[in-house]
Image (cartoon, rainbow, N blue to C red):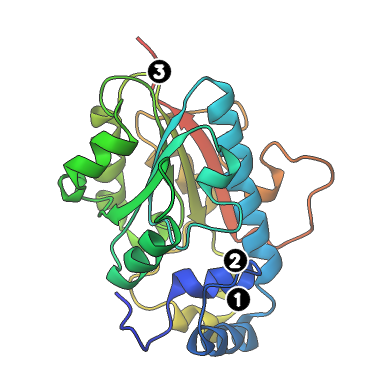
């Protein structure tokens, strides 16, 4: 949880994506991380592009409701901008991010923002869930789970994904990413991520999905998941997948 005068990961990402909703403290933190790692903007553009392609793929299946965990700042190609006909509930555990998100979406009748912990579905505001994801548990929806797996141990991640599988209706979709071991080569940057940060070898990713069934692409570097044209060359820092709870 970021204090009001502390840097926020969500706002740092907004900075890297070229957004307008960050503060000098976030820019300074982003610069410090880049001094230890290298440029990050292209990597986060690649991850945001993956989000867009995954959301469009879900929408093409007729899904028009999305539940987003660890949503960050709801701009720069986030879900409601990619799927403007859908309704979207963004959630985050950081109160400052939730406040910013609510401010940015105040005029929208199709997207809302509330507090929500992906590891405890009971933390979601029932009224917001009913308003923006009215089909939750009854018809297929899209679940976006990006930027979270790296901060959950294997047991917690597996339990969380299984609970989402049980709660979401058959035919629902899951967009998810995992952090590879790429950051291991940059120990100073790795130390900035804190003790909860978990890198995983690629062969560990797919088993963590549990009963969610990935599409034919499997879990691959995000730039190589259904790319449109030639993907921008970036380190394979994030792997991603689109997976489904089978219908019926």
Left or right position of 115 against 101 = left
Identity of the residue drawn at 66% across and 60% down: 45
Cα separation, mark 1 vs mark 3, equals 38 Å
Q: What element carries label 2?
A: helix
Q: Quadrant of residue 60?
A: top right
Identity of the residue drawn at 54% across and 51% down: 78
> In x, y percent, where is residue 175?
48, 40
Q: Give yes or no for contact between labels 2 and 1 (Cβ–Cβ under 8 Å).
A: yes
> In x, y percent, where is residue 100?
39, 68
For marks 3 and 2, the one nearer the N-term is 2
Residue at the extreme right: 230
Q: How crowded is mark 2: few (under 14 residues within 10 Å), some or many (20 or more)?
A: some
Identity of the residue drawn at 19% across and 47% down: 125
Q: In this view, does 78 lie above or below 29?
A: above
Q: Which mark is residue 182?
A: 2
Q: Quadrant of the N terminus?
A: bottom left
Cα separation, mark 2 vs mark 1, equals 6 Å
Which is more foreground, mark 1 or mark 3? 3
Q: Which mark is residue 247?
A: none
Q: What element carries label 1?
A: helix
Q: Residue 246 carries which label?
A: 3
Residue at the extreme top: 248
> In x, y percent, where is residue 133?
33, 34
Q: Is residue 103 above or below residue 142?
A: below
Identity of the residue drawn at 40% across and 19% down: 171
Cα separation, mark 3 vs mark 2, equals 32 Å
Q: Name the residue under label 1.
A: 185
Q: In this view, does 3 lie above or below 14?
A: below
């Amino acid at each position: 949880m970021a204090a009001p005068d502390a840097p926020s990961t969500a706002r740092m990402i907004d900075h890297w994506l070229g957004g307008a909703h960050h503060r000098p403290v976030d820019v300074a933190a982003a610069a410090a991380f880049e001094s230890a790692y290298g440029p990050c903007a292209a990597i986060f553009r690649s991850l945001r592009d993956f989000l867009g392609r995954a959301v469009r793929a879900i929408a093409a299946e007729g899904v028009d409701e999305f539940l987003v965990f660890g949503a960050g700042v709801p701009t720069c190609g986030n879900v409601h901008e990619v799927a403007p006909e859908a309704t979207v509930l963004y959630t985050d555990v950081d109160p400052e991010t939730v406040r910013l998100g609510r401010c940015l979406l105040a005029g929208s009748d199709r997207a809302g923002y509330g507090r929500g912990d992906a590891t405890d579905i009971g933390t979601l505001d029932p009224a917001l869930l009913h308003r923006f994801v009215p089909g939750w548990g009854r018809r297929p929806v899209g679940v976006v789970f990006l930027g979270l797996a790296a901060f959950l141990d294997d047991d917690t991640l597996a339990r969380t994904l299984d609970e989402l599988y049980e709660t979401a209706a058959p035919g629902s979709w899951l967009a998810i990413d995992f952090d590879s071991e790429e950051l291991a080569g940059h120990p100073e940057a790795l130390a900035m991520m804190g003790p909860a940060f978990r890198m995983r070898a690629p062969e560990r990713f797919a088993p963590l999905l549990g009963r969610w069934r990935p599409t034919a692409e499997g879990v691959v570097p995000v730039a190589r998941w259904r790319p449109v044209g030639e993907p921008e060359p970036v380190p394979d820092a994030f792997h991603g997948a689109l997976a489904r709870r089978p219908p019926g």
